[in-house]
């Protein structure tokens, strides 16, 4: 049974999420602060398949909790919840390693859909029959091992989230082709729609930050106006 850790200080909301997750067949544990969540994860690093993490927590913000999880080199998917509406808040959430960001108030079905998607994506492996990309792939100054998630740029290690790795893998699989936002949402996020209109764009910004010499003038992750994005391994001039 897949196990979800709910970190939410609004008790009524946490209880509601727990009840509905359990009704869907998940095991769910809830805590009301970040320190308690990190203690549980430290005691059993492989014990959870997803963390649903509120941003505004007593004593330690969701940003700090997510950063601490990533510093422990854990690939635990993180769904961040927040009532904040600014784009900057979502971007910061992705920057610290969140896989998805869901704004409060949210629809229950959307929460459950994202939960299933993140857990299924974590469980899924890239089998030999499906793999069309070498285990170790290099472009520009970057070297990526898609099996171990080890990434380096100019011989310096770079830490990517599971979602960023899968997004990169999908671009490499479709190198040279224009891919739409809808295709990315379906094949990377496993969703038919975006919880926020900027989800894909924010992740592209992250990839540019990691891999482009000048993120403002990308040569690998190119925008195609009105269509989507195109990945060019050899490097090309493009408009971001």
Image: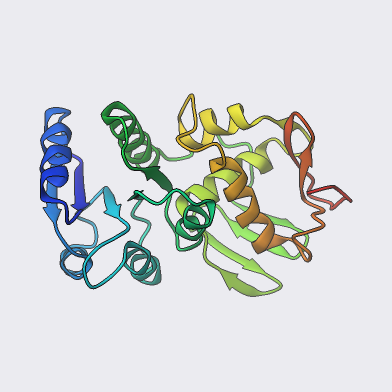
Image quarter hosting the N terminus:
top left
- Decide: is 102 above or below 64: above
Viewer can see residue 152: yes
Q: Which of the 4 image quadrants contains residue 97?
A: bottom left
Identify which residue, 189 or 138, lies in the foreground.
189
- Residue appearing at x 49%, y 48% in the figure: 163
Task: Point out the residue furthest to the top here.
Answer: 192
Query: Against 139, is 174 above or below?
Result: above
Left or right: residue 4 versus residue 156 is left
In the image, 156: left or right of 28? Answer: right
Q: Residue 153 is drawn in which quadrant?
A: bottom right
Return the x and y of residue 187 as percentages of the image width and height: 53, 31
Q: Residue at x 38, y 43 (%)?
A: 103
x and y percentages locating residue 206 in the rendered image: 61, 56
Measuring 78% from the left and 60% from the top, which residue is drawn there? 140
The color scheme shown is rainbow
Q: Residue furthest bottom?
A: 156
Q: Quadrant of residue 177?
A: top right
Instruction: Residue 231: give x, y in percent of width and height.
Output: 74, 43
Residues 235 and 124: in front is: 235
> Horizontal placement of 72 versus 167: left or right?
left
> Could one spot residue 127 in this view of the protein?
no
Instruction: Indicate whether 141 appears above or below 125.
Output: below
Choose between 140 and 188: the one closer to the eye: 188
Image location (x, y in percent) of residue 192:
48, 24
Question: Horizontal placement of 17 versus 146: left or right?
Answer: left
Task: Name the residue located 66 percent from the left edge and 41 percent from the top edge.
Answer: 171
């Amino acid at each position: 049974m897949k196990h979800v850790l709910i970190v939410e200080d609004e008790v009524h909301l946490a209880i509601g999420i727990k009840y509905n997750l359990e009704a869907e067949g998940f095991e769910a544990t809830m805590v009301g602060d970040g320190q308690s969540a990190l203690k549980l994860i430290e005691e059993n690093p492989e014990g959870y398949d997803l963390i649903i993490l509120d941003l505004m927590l007593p004593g330690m913000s969701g940003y700090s909790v997510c950063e601490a999880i990533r510093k422990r080199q854990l690939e635990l998917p993180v769904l961040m919840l927040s009532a904040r509406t600014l784009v900057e808040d979502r971007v910061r959430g992705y920057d610290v390693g969140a896989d998805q960001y869901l704004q409060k108030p949210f629809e229950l079905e959307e929460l459950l859909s994202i939960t299933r998607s993140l857990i299924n994506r974590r469980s899924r492996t890239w089998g030999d029959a499906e793999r069309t990309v070498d285990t170790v792939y290099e472009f520009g100054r970057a070297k990526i091992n898609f099996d171990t998630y080890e990434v380096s740029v100019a011989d310096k290690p770079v830490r990517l989230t599971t979602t960023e790795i899968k997004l990169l893998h999908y671009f490499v699989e479709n190198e040279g082709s224009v891919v739409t936002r809808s295709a990315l949402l379906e094949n990377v996020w496993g969703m038919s729609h975006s919880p926020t209109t900027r989800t894909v764009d924010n992740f592209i910004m992250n990839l540019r930050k990691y891999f482009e010499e000048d993120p403002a003038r990308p040569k690998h992750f190119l925008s195609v106006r009105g269509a989507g994005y195109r990945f060019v391994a050899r490097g090309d001039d493009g408009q971001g």
